[in-house]
Amino acid sequence: MIDSIALKGPLGAPQGHHERRLVHVAFCQLSTGKSKLGTTFISSPLTGAQMEVKYDIEQDKGIPVAMVSVKIPLASATIGQNYAHAGLDDIRLEMRCAGWLTRIALTVCGFSEAEIHHFITHTRTDLLELTWHTQTNSRNAQRNLLKRTREAFVALRALSSRHDIAVRDVETREKNGAGGLLVTLKSGDRFRQYPKYDQVLAKASKGKSKYAVAPEIKPRIGELHDAIETHGRNEIIFGPDTLAELGLSYPNAWTSESLRAAIDWFWHEVRLDVDASFDPTALGETAKRTLARYDAGEPVEKSLSSATFTRHRTEILAAGGPDIDPRARGLGDMLRSVGRQLAYDKRWRVPNELRNLVLCDVTAPPIIEELKQGLEYIRDGVPPDIGNDDARVAWLARWNRFVQNERLWDPQFGIQLNRA
């Protein structure tokens, strides 16, 4: 369900070793060479997908605090593909995977175990991307779904001057014959929709390198590709302000129920919720008369003052009635239709025979165990006890390659091993 996540938290007081293993960007100013901290990219030891670490020093009541941000493409960094995701029932397992990857990324940056523990304990979420698919029966149906979704949000954007309309901007694109949609809310949260039938491997652009599909998945990736060929992919990207408002800043607050409530909140904000019912008895007499005139086709926005029209419109909307703004005529039915088809409850469920290709209860436990063992290995230099010879050789090859690529045990730049 989680496609990507960004966390931010304190390490404690700034220390001399903090910047030793971080990326520095050199630049010239008035013929003087200088450098500043940049984004440090760390490849996942399992797949090579890149995680991002940023370091900064902030002031808290006049006291300097070392702050770190970590961004993880969770599906790509664990299972090696972000084609499809399981549902919210596996959210706690996804969180544990994210937690171990975060510990590994911070360890690679040279931070101490105590500092990492402090970060994990106090971290807050800056970004959370939740993803699900809507199934259609053909490419034509898929294109029609994307078209109707685009039209609904474009119509909402036309009303964005009104403060109760959450949509601020709508961007559309056409690439390789496939349409894409990006909706930005006034809150900063975003909604994306596009067909997900492109290549499994990420393109080497924007600082991202190609990453490896897990060996046990690669022979069957075509099955997953075929299964989602006519799907519409839906992504809700929550920002820090909304997560704080919903009480979800701290990952420990995440459950399938709390994140489902967040999806419902977003659906309500963009008027895609379909359960709202109209209660005419909640209207005052003047608002009732305005609605009757609107239903009769009268341009009430012209006969009422701006303040009265806005007041009646707000009252009618609060009762579950139609939007009487002339630009919104017919929009309610359009939004309900789109919202009904895209709803999380109507999402495509990953079939049992494909669950070992996505991050879920089938695949997450061994991934968690390997990440835990790998963290102990890069800290202590002691490999785990793996009974199967082939599995042990493959494990050591994978983690030794990670150690070498990140120069973890380099005499000059490496981390301090915990060897006795």
Image: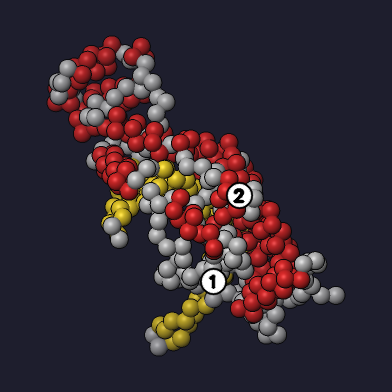
Residue 156: x and y, percent? 28, 39
**Residue 62 shows in this picture:** no
Residue tagged 1: 40
The crowd level at tag 1 (other Cα within 10 Å; few <14, some 14-19, many 20+) is: some
Comparing labels 2 and 1, the label whose residue is closer to the camera: 2
How did the renderer colour the structure?
A: secondary structure
Residue 99: x and y, percent? 65, 56
Residue found at x 47% / y 40%: 347
Q: Name the quarter where the C terminus is drawn.
A: bottom right
Mark 2 or mark 1, earlier in chain: 1
For marks 2 and 1, give the CA distance: 29 Å
Q: Nearer the viewer, residue 140 or 108?
A: 140
Circle 1 SS class: strand
Left or right of 162 on screen, residue 68: right
State which quadrant residue 138 falls in: top left
* Residue type at tag 1: Thr
Residue 275: x and y, percent? 42, 26
Discs 2, 1 touching: Cβ within 8 Å: no
Residue found at x 15% / y 24%: 299
The crowd level at tag 2 (other Cα within 10 Å; few <14, some 14-19, many 20+) is: many
Residue situated furthest bottom in the rendering: 31
* Residue type at tag 2: Cys
Left or right of 50 on screen, residue 228: left
In this rendering, the answer to whether 261 lies above or below 284 is below
Q: Nearer the viewer, residue 200 or 234?
A: 200
The disc at residue 217 is none
Circle 2 SS class: loop
Residue tagged 2: 360
State which quadrant residue 373 falls in: bottom right
Residue found at x 56% / y 55%: 357
